[in-house]
Image (tube, helix red, strand yellow):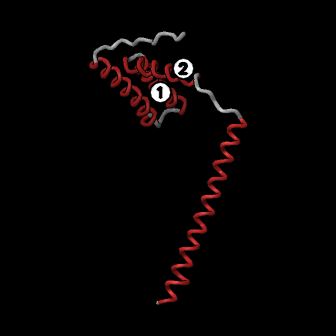
Amino acid sequence: MSKPKEQVEEPSKGRDLVLVTIAIIVAVAGVLAFTFLSDQSLGVRLACLAAGLVVGCAIAWFSPSGKRFIAYGRASYDELRLVVWPTRRETLTSTGLVMGFVVIIALFLFVIDKIIEWGLYDVLLKLI
């Protein structure tokens, strides 16, 4: 039995745009504070940077776009849990087959290259 999909309300795009813009401005303000407060101690600068990024992420988190992103992340995680991962033996077998195929193709291309080289340098150039 599957659980129902989480519904996220579809508010106005204007409100969403304003919240995301404010979140970006706050995050950029934290980065700029870190940059321009060079005369302050490193702790103060890092606190300004962290505060700006945390507050910006919090605003974005509670915006409609953030809620859609969280719902997408949860759905992706649920899908990831449904993946059947190969066993160690299957992985090693597949890797071995791919590496063997690469070696065979490399040898084939080497032989073709030597045939073309022989044809151009030893046959065609000796005729001229």
Q: Secondary structure at mark 2?
A: helix
Q: Secondary structure at mark 1?
A: helix
- Whether residue 19 sits left or right of residue 69 in the image: it is left
Q: Which residue is mark 1?
A: 48
Q: Amino acid at mark 2?
A: Asp
Tell me the tag on residue 37: none
The image quadrant of residue 59 is: top left
Identify the residue shown where x is 42% and y is 31%.
33
Q: Give the mark count.
A: 2
Q: Amino acid at mark 1?
A: Cys
Binning the other alpha carbons within 10 Å of mark 1 as few (below 14), some (14 to 19) or many (20 upward) gives many
| Residue 116 % position (x, y) | 53, 74
The answer for how far apart the CA atoms under marks 2 and 1 are is 36 Å
Q: Is residue 65 above or below residue 123?
A: above
Q: Which residue is mark 2?
A: 78
Viewer-proximal residue among 127 and 47? 127
Q: Is residue 32 above or below residue 111?
A: above
Identify the residue shown where x is 41% and y is 11%.
7
Q: Is residue 54 above or below residue 3?
A: below
Q: In this view, which residue lies farthest toward the right?
A: 89
